[in-house]
Image (tube, grey):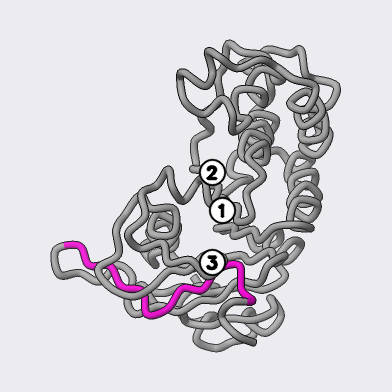
């Protein structure tokens, strides 16, 4: 398979903070409609890897190609325009706006302040909001103020805000933290739906959840990849049990 066939090709990626290699010559390939879960102990470099892909942190060396375009010198907003969406651990939704308005303002035309002012809610946007709201399980909550949603629903709304931008790569950092068992179930189903036409990378600690959603699991340790493959294979790997699952 040539590199051009991957949604994301990370090669020899390195980042040092004060001489400490947080990411150490890491190579990772993600397929187009793949749901990849990254696991590993705290300090393994998982969040730093997402920071490098979305442009929050600059690499010291190596290459990150998305749809065969080199990202290394691209600003964060340029990467968003290319189709990379990133959800952080704390949701950033507009609490005093309705679910509909939260999704509406996330539509790409409204991205800049001037864009938002000149922005008329067209039928196209309304249709897009409707589809995304159904996708995230909030189709019947469009008029609800976002601040009144449950913790899990707020997380889904934020995923929806990213989906409005039609990203081809979506990155989620611990999406089920603080969720109820039922919300976790629904989130697993949501993630399985949204990876149908995009690549999704999830960082997660909950092994039951990982088992449910992952097409493939990457285990990180000390800025490197320790193991990779289907969950069954990774779980049985003595190195992984030793540094991670055994604790």
Q: Residue furthest left?
A: 18
How many numbered dots are placed on residues in this image?
3
Return the x and y of residue 14 as percentages of the image width and height.
31, 73
Name the N-terminal-most of marks 1 and 2. 2
Q: Which residues are magenta?
A: 5-17
Answer yes or no: do the residues labelled 1 and 2 have beta carbons within 8 Å?
yes
Q: 187 left or right of 240?
A: right
- Above or below: residue 76 compared with residue 155: below
Residue nearest the viewer, comparing 94 with 164: 164
Tell me the number on the disc at residue 87: 2
Return the x and y of residue 84 as percentages of the image width and height.
54, 51
Predominant secondary structure, magenta span: strand
Answer yes or no: do the residues labelled 1 and 3 have beta carbons within 8 Å?
no
Residue nearest the viewer, comparing 232 with 143: 143
Name the N-terminal-most of marks 2 and 3. 3
Tell me the number on the disc at residue 39: 3
């Amino acid at each position: 398979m040539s590199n051009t066939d991957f949604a994301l090709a990370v090669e020899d990626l390195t980042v040092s903070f004060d001489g400490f290699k947080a990411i150490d010559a890491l190579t990772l390939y993600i397929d187009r409609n793949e749901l990849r879960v990254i696991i590993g102990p705290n300090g393994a470099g998982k969040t730093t890897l997402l920071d490098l892909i979305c442009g929050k942190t600059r690499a010291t060396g190596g290459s990150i190609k998305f749809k065969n375009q080199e990202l290394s010198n691209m600003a964060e907003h340029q990467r968003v325009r290319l189709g990379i969406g990133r959800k952080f651990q704390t949701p950033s939704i507009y609490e005093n706006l309705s679910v509909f308005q939260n999704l509406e303002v996330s539509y790409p035309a409204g991205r800049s302040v001037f864009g938002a002012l000149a922005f008329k809610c067209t039928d196209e946007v309304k249709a897009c909001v409707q589809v995304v709201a159904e996708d995230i399980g909030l189709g019947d909550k469009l008029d609800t103020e976002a601040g009144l949603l449950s913790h899990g629903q707020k997380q889904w709304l934020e995923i929806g805000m990213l989906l409005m931008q039609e990203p081809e790569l979506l990155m989620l950092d611990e999406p089920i933290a603080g969720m109820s068992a039922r919300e976790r179930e629904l989130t697993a189903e949501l993630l399985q739906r949204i990876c149908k036409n995009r690549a999704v990378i999830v960082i997660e600690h909950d092994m039951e959840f990982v088992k449910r959603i992952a097409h493939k699991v990457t285990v990180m340790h000390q800025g490197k990849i320790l193991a990779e493959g289907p969950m069954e294979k990774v779980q049985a790997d003595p190195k992984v049990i030793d540094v991670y699952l055994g604790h």
